[in-house]
Image (spheres, rainbow, N blue to C red):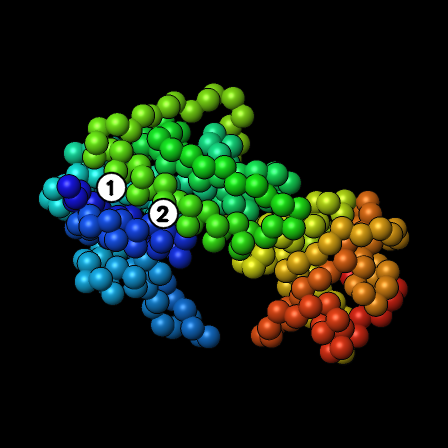
């Protein structure tokens, strides 16, 4: 038996879930995604989201409302006569009329071990906080922010060098498998929902521009976690004196290292940099408009000298 599904998602993270549901033979009656955004070098071209493009390849109707609060949008959603809505990183608040607009309700794939890291940036926040594990969860949505009862979960280890990009890809594939299993259990009327704990609630707020600039007065462990938690996007960064002036450089990988000095001081030509406590060695860097390079390749062009001070 197949279900009539409304899929609601926007970024690349959501695509494997949509494809898995299609692969199981379910009827995707419509896809909701964020409206096309300006892109290109001048920001003049409107580019559909990854989910939008993927749905169109399958000939699925795509809807891109800026809001779901109008009676007209809510009626259009109900008129789809869907059995269930599947939501993965959609990006819009779902009003009560949408949450109640299908026969079985709305189910969300969320990339954390709820109630830890409710909100917009759970993958980045888990790494930046130094968490050693996270996971993927399927929950039935209610009116709160990621507060609904949990249907399925799978834990994932976070190693000391895991980046947000690596964890993103891993959880995306796990989420596709979990969602397929959850929908199958729902079809059999055997899906068990467990209320979230009231203890251990944390919120994963959006990453701000201020957070992406490295503050060398922080301890090395915090700087290391920030670099890997923001890699590859939006990317932690600092300024370096290259050639005749300061240049913004994105930091993509680092290692904890020994050493001490005035925070921001380059301790050797291997790009070991002093922090508020300890030091980090910069392993992968990217100059503006260039490609990611390992430390040695970067140094051949940048020639950051021992003793240089990173602002």
Is 277 positioned to the left or the right of 177 in the image? right
Q: Quadrant of residue 56?
A: bottom left
Q: Work out how far the residue at label 2 is from the one at label 1, CA to CA, in angstroms.
A: 15 Å
Mark 2 closeness class: few <14, some 14–19, many ≥20 residues within 10 Å:
many
Element class at badge 1: strand
Total tally of numbered discs in the picture: 2
Depicted 81 relative to depicted 246: above or below:
above
The quarter of the picture where the C terminus appears is: bottom right
Q: Quadrant of residue 48?
A: bottom left
In this view of the protein, can residue 264 be seen by the observer?
A: no
- Is 159 or 45 nearer to us in this picture? 159
The picture places residue 286, in percent across and down from the top left corner, at: 64, 68
Mark 1 closeness class: few <14, some 14–19, many ≥20 residues within 10 Å:
many
Is 227 positioned to the left or the right of 43 in the image? right
- Is 159 or 256 nearer to us in this picture? 159
**What residue sits 30% from the left and 51% below the top?**
20
The quarter of the picture where the N terminus appears is: top left
**What residue sits 73% from the left and 45% below the top?**
221
* Residue behind mark 2: 176
Question: Which is more N-terminal, label 1 or label 2?
Answer: 1
The picture places residue 251, in percent across and down from the top left corner, at: 66, 61
Q: Identify the mark at residue 143; answer none if there is no mark.
A: none
Of badges 2 and 1, nearer the viewer stands: 2
The picture places residue 299, in percent across and down from the top left corner, at: 76, 73
Is 197 positioned to the left or the right of 127 in the image? left
Element class at badge 2: helix
**What residue sits 35% from the left and 30% below the top?**
151
The picture places residue 215, in percent across and down from the top left corner, at: 72, 51
* Residue behind mark 1: 85
């Amino acid at each position: 038996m197949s279900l009539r599904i409304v899929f609601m998602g926007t970024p690349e993270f959501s695509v494997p879930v949509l494809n898995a549901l299609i692969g199981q033979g379910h009827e995707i009656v419509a896809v909701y995604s964020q409206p096309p955004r300006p892109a290109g070098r001048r920001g003049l071209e409107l580019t559909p989201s990854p989910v939008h493009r993927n749905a169109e390849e399958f000939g699925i109707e795509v809807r891109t409302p800026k809001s779901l609060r109008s009676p007209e949008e809510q009626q259009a959603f109900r008129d789809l006569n869907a059995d269930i809505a599947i939501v993965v990183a959609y990006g819009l608040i779902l009003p009560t009329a949408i949450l109640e607009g299908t026969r079985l309700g709305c189910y969300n794939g969320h990339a954390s071990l709820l109630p830890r890291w409710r909100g917009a940036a759970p993958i980045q926040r888990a790494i930046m906080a130094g968490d050693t594990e996270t996971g993927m969860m399927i929950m039935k949505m209610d009116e709160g922010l990621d507060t609904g009862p949990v249907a399925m979960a799978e834990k994932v280890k976070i190693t000391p060098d895991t980046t947000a990009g690596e964890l993103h890809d891993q959880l995306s594939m796990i989420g596709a498998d979990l969602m397929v299993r959850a929908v199958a259990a729902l079809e059999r009327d055997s899906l068990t929902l467990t209320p979230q704990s009231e203890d251990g609630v944390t919120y994963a707020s959006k990453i701000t521009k201020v957070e992406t600039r490295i503050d060398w007065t922080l301890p090395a462990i915090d700087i290391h976690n920030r670099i890997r938690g923001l890699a590859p996007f939006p990317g932690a960064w600092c300024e370096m004196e290259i050639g005749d002036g300061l240049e913004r450089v994105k930091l993509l990988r680092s290692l904890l290292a020994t050493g001490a000095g005035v925070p921001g001081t380059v301790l050797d030509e291997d790009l070991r940099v002093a922090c508020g406590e300890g030091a980090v060695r910069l392993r992968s860097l990217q100059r503006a408009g260039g490609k990611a390079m390992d430390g040695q390749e970067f140094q051949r062009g940048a020639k950051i000298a021992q003793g240089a001070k990173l602002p």
